[in-house]
Amino acid sequence: MPLETPARIVGELTSRGYNAEREAVTLLANATDSATAIERTLETIPDDALVITTDHVRSAVGEPTEPEEGTAEPTAVDGAADGPPSTTSPASQDPSVSSGTEPRSSTDSGGTTPVETGGSSAAEAAVDSSSESGTDRAGAGAASRDPTRQALDIVAELEYSTGTGELSDFVSVFRDRYERLSSKLRGRVNHRPTDTLDAMSGGSEAAIVGVVSDIRSTASGHWLIELEDTNGVFPCLVMKDRDIADLVDELLFDEVIAVEGTLADDGGILFVDALYFPDIPRTHQPSTADREVSAALVSDVHVGSQEFMADAWGRFTDWLHTAEGESVEYLLLAGDMVEGVGVYPDQDEELDIVDIYDQYEQFSEHLKEVPGDVEIVMIPGNHDAVRLAEPQPAFDEELRAIMSAHDARIASNPATVDVEGVSILMYHGVSLDEVIAELPDEKASYDEPHEAMYQLLKKRHVAPQFGGHTRLAPEAEDFLVIDEPPDVFHAGHVHKFGYGKYHNVLTINSGCWQAQTAFQESVNIDPDTAMAPIVDLSTLDLTIRKFA
């Protein structure tokens, strides 16, 4: 079967454990039979080769034919786009990364906001196998790191929980959410409080900023949205034949939006002409580090599970000790260090370690395999021994004492971390289940987890819907609001790999280190495993390494 595009060539080579030079990928893509060209190349290269070179391809299949019209060469994932991307590229030329064996790239989506950047294509990432034997763990990697230049700061997190569960806590957290998110919308619309709209004459133009308190369809197929502010509730009607009707599919209860339109003749309803999300500004320009340094972004290790991939984790940590891994000075773990106990039905039958503290002891042993001069940041997930309700406080002192290797930095879920000037929002990702369940497949799916993360960026909130599947705890303020646009958004939880860019925010869901369990098989979860996204903090270029 012809592979047709450079992206598919890269995906096929990655699945075989090889990286490739850009020109080599182009030669294979331009071959009369790309699949046969790949097989011939892999049969003739040296046994110890990990990178397919141009000479390897020419030796195997000869000189290429002229490129076919419309064939694109792969490029590096770049923090700054060379120019505006095409928004009409066929999906086959710009698919989205979602598995470790066939990387696919995503497009940048912005709702009513014009598309700002294209997603990072699979052909744009250098995907490497790190299965070298005889790795020298005392090699140049550890020796060349410079801890004196490392700079890491946790700039936003839940330091300690103050919620009591009383009604006043719920009032406080929703009022705080409304005030902070509405401030991002009021400059875009001529907002009027809901209680003043009743005094306005029919046919007047008006705008509301409010919390979505209800969404329902009318008998005629239109959409009735009730928006609530601190003064009351007002009904807003989105006609089914309007272009903005598709945006209603993206709405979740309790998120904050703005609408503009015209009041009905009797003034009792607002006919909506435009709908706005708080959103990441189109003009957002990410910050970068002032030196060449990288961070590894991983998640969902699940030590204690019978399916924990200890060998793959060992290959990852071995690689960090090599000269090739020397640029990685930071390791960011986005939750689920261990498998936990009693998280899902009959989980005990799938545990290799049945005691939760023993699981953390074993995790700490695996953490010791990471070079000692790598800075580590960890946040909890839903399998960890902290409360399930978000925001999740950081690990308690007993667990911190167990996981004392490297003096890792422990933060809450979510947390924003400044790494050498690069703002990284870390969120485990439980709300992604809800986003994917509520929104249409083309807006959010498990196969494209980064697109569900785009929705959270658009809503400027990591878990907007209260009372659904995601447990939320009321605090004095809403720690789940995304106040400032991050430069990188890192999540996990769904055990699927994906990445892309949304308004210049590099968005990564990093998969897991746990092979498919019997429970996952029963609910049709096919995990993407042992992948380590490596972000060059000086450019925000992304390299994806697979260790299984």
Image (cartoon, helix red, strand yellow):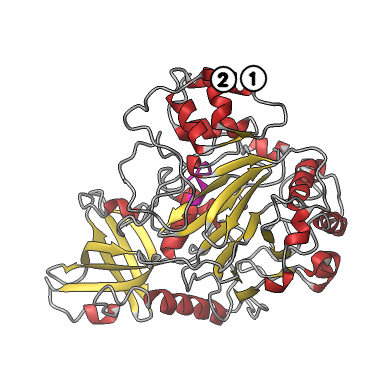
Horizontal and vertical percent position of residue 465: 49, 62
Q: Could you say which is closer to the camera, residue 256 or residue 482?
A: 482
Instruction: Name the amino acid, label 1.
Output: Glu
Horizontal and vertical percent position of residue 316: 74, 47
Q: Quadrant of the C terminus?
A: top right
Q: How many marks?
A: 2
Q: Which residue is mark 2?
A: 60
Q: Mark 2 near mark 1, Cβ–Cβ under 8 Å?
A: yes
Residue 49 forms part of the magenta stretch? no
| Quadrant of res 409 | bottom right
Asked if residue 181 is positioned above or below residue 279 in the image, the reply reads below
Secondary structure beneath disc 2?
Answer: helix
Q: Residue at x 50, y 19 (%)?
A: 62
On residue 43, which mark appears? 1
Q: Could you say which is closer to the camera, residue 131 or residue 473?
A: 131
**Tag 1: Cα neighbours inside 10 Å, few (<14), some, or many (≥20)?**
few
Q: Residue at x 31, y 46 (%)?
A: 87
Q: Is residue 426 left or right of residue 325?
A: left
| Quadrant of res 415 | bottom right
Q: Is residue 174 left or right of residue 267?
A: right
Asked if residue 327 is positioned above or below residue 134 in the image, the reply reads below
Q: Is residue 545 left or right of residue 452?
A: right
Which span of residues is magenta-colored?
A: 445-450
Could one spot residue 180 in this view of the protein? Answer: yes
Instruction: Name the amino acid, label 2.
Output: Ala
Horizontal and vertical percent position of residue 546: 66, 41
